[in-house]
Image (cartoon, rainbow, N blue to C red):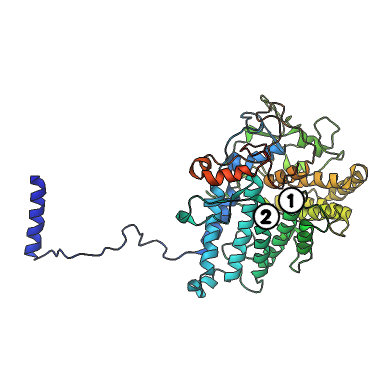
Amino acid sequence: MMKRIKSIFILGLICVLGVTVSCENVDFGDLNENPNGATKGNPSSLMANAMINYATATGRDYLIRPTLYVQYQSQVTYTTEMRYSETPSSWYTYYVGSLEGLHEVIQYASNPDNQGATLNAQGAPENQIGVAMLMQAEIVKRLADTYGSVPFSDALVGVDNLTPAYDSQEDVYTSLFTMVKEARDMMDDSKKGPTGDIIYGGDVAKWQQYANSLLLQMSLQLSDRYPDPSGFAATEFNEALSDAHGVIETVGAEAWFTYEDVSGFRNPWFANRTRDYFLSAEFVDALQGDDTEYNPTSNMTPDARLSVYSKDAELEGVPYGYRDESGAGKNQMSTKNYWNPTSSLPMMTAAYTYLNRAEAAALDWTEEDAEMMLKTGIMIDYESLDYHHGTSISEDAEAYADARVADAGTVGLLQVIREEKWVTLFAEGFDAWAEWRRTETPALMPATDFINGGEIPARYNYPSEESSLNNASYSEGVSRLTPAEDNNTSRTWWDVD
């Protein structure tokens, strides 16, 4: 008590004297604000950071699990993911690391108060918005394909809504079709592209081709829901294919991530232990064209792409799905072309686009020549690998492509097209997994020492915090699964059994 009285007395004395100190209220401003920090948003930085976070997302949930589920690789040390462990999977990097930043780009570039020379120096506002929307579509599609129902229309508003509703997978896809077309059509390739674009360097025309190629992919993902040649999926496919902006048809128009050996922008495979993962016997035997129990495809012709994918194309792979497997002396993913800090990775390729066109033609959705699309897709994939990895396999492309077209005459065109997608999408695990769940091609067998009941996973389990912090929305999302259980074997809306 005495200390308090003394303090009051001293303060009062100082105020009375008023000689050198004034007791008037002084506004020091917001002491939580950094006076040296940026006072306005920077769309270029936000866009680049969002793209980088997406391109470098690594670890088991963000990179490796899908490559195990489609049996590109086998685990040889810690085998639980390969054997389908039922564990929650995080989506934090997608929402916080990428989608929020892209949302900020759209909000900033759309605000009339920010229009002017400073904003235009970073790219025409409509081009900044369009590219940000296309990247959002790319990421949200992955989320919906991976989990099922996900926060979308109610998300990305920060503290204003900490418990966003889950949009159904059907509603997400419907929204994405609208979103991608809106983004494509608002962009103007006669104006400056966004300076924060690390994928196409601000080339707006290539983003418009990417948009149409993404629409082809999205349409085919719904082929089991809308199989009819006059139905919704086929109609969307044909509209995108005939759009004046075109689709990706050349290696130069492909969307790739090009990495640097600097902290924060290394190839995501580089952060993982190579000795824990080997190419599977199933994948190696398929590309070697071996007539063995492991080969899940119809291919019996050596595929030169194995020399690009593998550390040593002469070595065998590790049989998939066993609890204990040493893997000693077996085949690993190429440490030069993939498991390297500066190795490039694809986001959308011409090969995938041609193979989608081949499948659509085989489904009678279009009048294109399915065999020609298949052959072109294979050959341009060889060309793309040579271009991006400095290999020289293109001289073998035509002979292999002709052999696969011949195989189609025996086992069926759709089967060969879908098998070739599996090979082509080697570096795009999430897309490969989505394709396999839709088509169940190639004929992969579940892990022998399974954990989950013996089915190749159909989805990721929701993040653990969702059931406790956003339970109403989480429960609604689970209710839309078949069966309505948060398991990795429950099927999502487009995954028709």
- Circle 1 Cα neighbour tier, 10 Å, few/some/many (<14 / 14–19 / ≥20): many
| Residue 486: x %, y % from top left | 61, 38
**Label 2 sits on what residue type?**
Tyr
- Mark nearest the camera among 1 and 2 is 2
Residue at 58% x, 35% y: name it: 87
Question: Could you say which is closer to the camera, residue 34 or residue 108?
Answer: 108
**Residue 195 quadrant:** bottom right
Question: Could you say which is closer to the camera, residue 149 or residue 26?
Answer: 149
Give the numbered dot on residue 221. 1
| Residue 82: x %, y % from top left | 66, 33
| Kind of element beneath mark 1 | helix
Q: Is residue 138 visible?
A: yes
Looking at the image, is 115 positioned above or below residue 265? below
Give the numbered dot on residue 173. 2
- Circle 2 Cα neighbour tier, 10 Å, few/some/many (<14 / 14–19 / ≥20): many
Precedes in sequence: disc 1 or disc 2: 2
